[in-house]
Amino acid sequence: MAFDPQGHLVFSDFYNGTVSRLNSDGSVTVLVSGIAGPEGIVFLPDSTMIIAEQRTNRILSLAPGGQSLTVLRTLPGTPAGAPCKDGVDGIALDPITNTLVIPDSPTGNVYRMSLDGKKLTLLASGIPRPVGAAVDQNGTTYVADECGGALWSIAANGKTTRMGGFGKLDDVAFDSHGNILVTDLQPSIHALIRIRRSTGQRETLASKGFIEPQGLAVDKNDDIFVSDDYADIIVEFKPV
């Protein structure tokens, strides 16, 4: 999930191959269809939408108001049916360098990619299954590791740090206070978790009622949106 420049929530539907917009009146508009397993979404400042296509392990783009997709890049990894070898999942925009951060799940690598897809630079390797990604105001990249039970940070100088003790993380984002939010889809956990960076304390914000919490987005009001995959719903949490 991601918010477009107009503040609308945009979400991918992996099974139907669509990306849709949730309108202010509650209706839904399909923006593009025919995608082979759409996952992560990023909007560029000019409203171009970048989409991770999992089944082909490609990065696609859709111009503002466009109807046809452009393939920016096919990633090095080859998706397979083996556990933890699915294709690309979450992606992120690094506003400091104006590049995209792309976790390549089948290879366990994380790349930095130019907005036109022509340049791919290795940021980190050896992560069991890198999925969701987010970049903070200091240029540090955080990567959710679904099959390694960890959250990884990649500093601007390239230093990589592993924070373990999780189940199966799927996505990562920041709230307005700079705290880290993650979704953990391991069945025994199924939770939205907040990590306070000042102390490292972990807090479970929500855990009941989820079937498989995956996508994560935070709006300008600090409301948190979580997509529950198998329940086929999006849940909104408001700060208290």
Image (cartoon, rainbow, N blue to C red):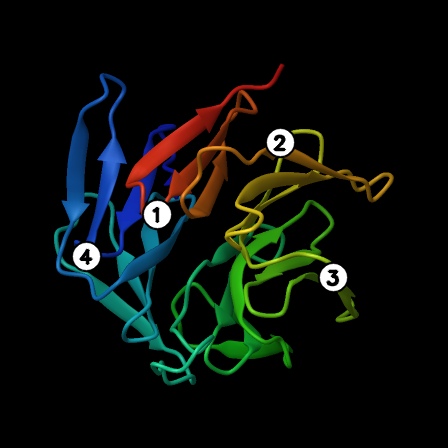
Please tell me which of labels 1 and 2 falls first in the chain: 2
Which residue is denoted by mark 1 in the rendering?
229
Decide: few, some or many residues near mark 4? Use Cα within 10 Å; few <14, some 14-19, many ≥20: some
CA gap between label 3 and label 1 equals 24 Å
In this view, 47 is above or below 155: above
Which element is circle 2 on? strand
Considering the numbered disc 1 on the image, is that residue within a helix, a strand or a loop?
A: loop
Using the numbered discs, state the Cα–Cα distance from disc 2 to disc 3 in whole angstroms: 19 Å
Which dot, 4 or 3, sits closer to the camera?
Answer: 3
Q: For the residue marked with disc 4, what is the amino acid? A: Gly
Q: Are marks 4 and 3 in contact (CB under 8 Å)?
A: no
Callout 4: SS: loop
The span from disc 4 to disc 1 (Cα, nearest Å) is 14 Å
Residue at the image point whose x is 36% and y is 80% from the top: 79
Residue designated by label 3: 164
Name the N-terminal-most of marks 2 and 3. 3
Q: Which residue is denoted by mark 4 in the rendering? A: 17
Element type at marker 3?
loop
